[in-house]
Image: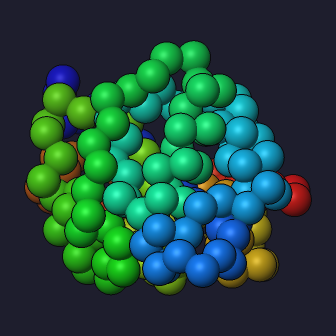
Amino acid sequence: MSVAEPRRIVLFRHAKADWSQETDHERPLADRGRLDAAAAGRSLAATGVAVDLAVCSTAVRTRETWKLAVQELPHRPRTVYEERIYEASPGELIALLNETPEDVRDLVLIGHNPGIHGLAEILAGSVEGDADGRMNAHGFPAASFAVLTFDGSWKSLEPAAATLVDFWAPFE
């Protein structure tokens, strides 16, 4: 793949989790979360982003979100479960994205707030349409995702290097 081709990053927050007696890392999805995760998968498929790689937090709720969402995509991308996403700061998430193999064009990162929302804001040096307003109107709710594009290599990804091109939330 040429680094001249734009790359896409989908920042996907896990769906609504249940407030069970489990530790935070082990919390499963709530019933509504399961419905929203599938709806998010359908909406992601409608964007036309052909995900090459999914990098997912090891938390139960993120794994369940991705398992339901990926069933709605036209093809199943390679998935890597990464414990560093759990409780990661935006800077730590950028460092993780910088490790992405150069043959990956489109990547989805399934994680948690506040890291996912913060990462979207930090990466977005520019915005198309009203995506920024929609993203910030409700604080990046559960099961929502932002789509960003950028030019260059994964190693060169840094703050303000991307364009926010789309945002989806389950209640839109």
Left or right relative to 123: residue 34: right
Scheme of colours in the image: rainbow
Measured as percent of width and height from the top left, residue 124 is found at 46, 68
Q: Give residue 7's position: percent from left, percent from top.
A: 34, 40
List the single residue furthest toward the top: 74
- Left or right of residue 72: residue 50: left
Q: Residue 94 lies in what quarter of the image? A: bottom left
Judge by depth and name the residue closer to the eye, 15 or 130: 15
Q: Residue at x 54, y 60 (%)?
A: 61
Furthest residue to the front?
Answer: 21
- Can residue 49 be seen in the rendering of this structure? yes
Locate the C terminus and report the quarter of the image it occupies. bottom right
**Residue at screen point 38% across, 52% down:** 56
Of all residues, the one furthest to the right in this rendering is 171
**Picture residue at 27% right of the left edge, 43% below the top:** 80
Q: Give the left or right position of residue 123, taking residue 22 as reference.
A: left
Image coordinates for residue 84, horizontal then vertical, percent: 24, 68
| Residue drawn at point x = 60 percent, y = 26 percent | 71
Q: How many marks?
A: 0
Residue 105 lies, with reference to residue 13, above or below; the image says above
Tell me, yes or no, if residue 157 can be seen here: no
Q: Is residue 107 above or below residue 52?
A: below
- Pick the front one: 124 or 120: 120
Question: Residue 91 falls in which quadrant of the image?
Answer: bottom left
**Residue 65 location, x and y as percent?**
58, 49
